[in-house]
Amino acid sequence: LPAACRAVGLPGLVIGPLFALGTVFFVISITSTSVANTLVIIATSPLFAALLSFVMMGEMLAFSTALAIMAGLLGVVVTVWGSLGEGRLLGDLAALGTAVCMALNFTLIRRARARDLMPVYALSGLLITLAALPFAEPFAFTGIQWAWLALLVLLVHPVAFLLITLGPRYLSAPEVSLLMLLETVFGPLWVWLALGERPPDGTLLGGAVILGALAANAAWRLRAVRLRRSSLAWPGGGGA
């Protein structure tokens, strides 16, 4: 463990606790507000990542990304505004904390991309376990709940993270961003169909603003990528 800590360096020792904190925020959010609110607000993490990359790494913001950030923040305000007085504000703020932690992690990982950061996930898992231990109730699950838990940790999570890792190898970043928006659409839909939890009206409106901003920004970036590829492939365009 000490050797692994030395290998990841200071960035890794920051990323691990941030990942754990984001996970704790997510659990608080998913149990304190609607699933739709949680996923809609967390969907803004790419916008926060772009803003943090500008502040921390000096990466220039594209005009379309700057507009998407402003629209995304407006969508968050609309979503949270609908929760005022309904007891969901804590969950919404926790979802916002998750989005910021994710964005900060993305930025730090990019800055430390020369390092092997895989041990970071073991560190974050240990921290999450220690944070949850005081609230744990041994053998509190029933038989069917153990089955759902096993399905989650043995199939759903591993396959999801495997596909998320493989996807960017074959698709451009804008294409991945567009496809990832489906989580924000289908997540609340499955919960609505399975558990009868209808997304609040404010969440539907705020979510439409956020998804529209993300989709427009990703579509613009995808168009730029395709134009660049076509110019390189065209004779005299730099590819010959």
Image (cartoon, rainbow, N blue to C red):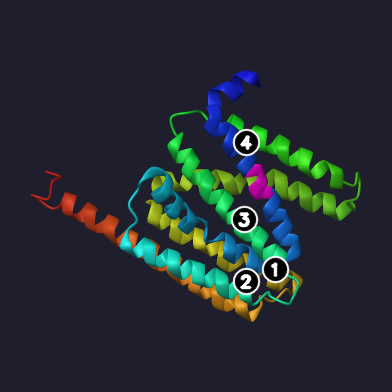
Residue 117 at least partly seen: no
User: How many angstroms separate mark 2 from mark 1 (CA)?
Assistant: 7 Å
User: How many angstroms separate mark 1 from mark 4 (CA)?
Assistant: 29 Å
Which residue position holds label 1?
89
* Mark nearer the N terminus (3 vs 4): 3
Tag 4, which secondary structure?
A: helix
Q: How many marks?
A: 4
* Mark nearer the N terminus (1 vs 4): 1
Tag 3, which secondary structure?
A: helix
- Mark 1–mark 4 contact, CB under 8 Å? no
Residue 30: mark in rendering: none
Residue 97: mark in rendering: 3
Q: Nearer the viewer, residue 182 or 106?
A: 106
Q: Which kind of residue does numbered mark 3 sit on?
A: Gly
Circle 3 residues within 10 Å: few <14, some 14–19, many ≥20: many
- Mark 3–mark 4 contact, CB under 8 Å? no
Q: Nearer the viewer, residue 127 or 125?
A: 127
Majority SS type along the magenta span: helix
Residue 49 x, y percent position in the rendering: 47, 52
Q: Which kind of residue does numbered mark 4 sit on?
A: Tyr
- Mark 2–mark 1 contact, CB under 8 Å? yes
199 to the left or right of 239: right
